[in-house]
């Protein structure tokens, strides 16, 4: 079972996305901010990370920067979850080392296809 870290400060989005992924047989580790996400990532070593950009404590860009410094996470697929369709925001995330992004509100099939792309399923 693939392990997914979901870092999202919006409770409703976090819970709904977690439920969607669990129904698809993923093991989900939800985190409500970047600090909690880092703690979970270091402990659980997820196969893929989905992370919001705008969050309290540590934003998504800084979260990604910290994670990529750890050798274990150099190649872990990282998807930004963003409400912003601004090309500059998306490009900033890709330049920071994210593999891809999905814009909220998202289509469930779109998210699952993107995850399968990076998990090789």
Image (spheres, helix red, strand yellow):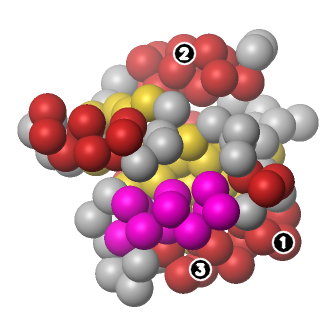
Q: In which quadrant will I find the C terminus? A: top right
The CA distance from mark 3 to mark 2 is 27 Å
Q: Please give the name of the residue rendered at 82% of the width and 37% of the height, measured from the top-left corner.
A: 2
Compute the Cα span from label 1 to label 3.
Answer: 11 Å
Tell whether position 97 is magenta: no
In the image: residue 73, left or right of residue 64: right
Residue 89's label in the rendered image is: none
Mark closest to the chain's N terminus, 3 or 2: 3
x and y, in percent, of residue 87 in the image: 14, 33
Q: Position of residue 95 (x, y in %)?
A: 36, 40
The residue to which callout 2 is attached is 113
Q: Secondary structure at mark 1?
A: helix
Residue with the mark numbered 1: 43
User: Magenta part of the protein: which range?
Assistant: 59-69
Closer to the camera, 1 or 74? 74
Can you identify the residue that label 3 sits on? 36
């Amino acid at each position: 079972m693939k392990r997914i870290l979901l870092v999202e400060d919006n409770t409703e989005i976090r819970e709904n996305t977690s439920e969607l992924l669990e129904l698809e047989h993923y093991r989900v580790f939800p985190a409500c901010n970047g600090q909690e996400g880092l703690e979970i990532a270091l402990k659980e070593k997820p196969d893929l990370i989905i992370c919001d950009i705008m969050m309290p404590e540590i934003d998504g860009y800084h979260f990604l920067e910290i994670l990529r410094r750890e050798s274990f996470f150099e190649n872990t697929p990282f998807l930004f979850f963003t409400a912003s369709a601004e090309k500059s925001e998306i490009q900033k995330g890709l330049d920071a080392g994210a593999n891809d992004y999905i814009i909220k509100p998202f289509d469930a099939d779109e998210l699952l296809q993107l995850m399968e792309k990076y998990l090789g399923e």
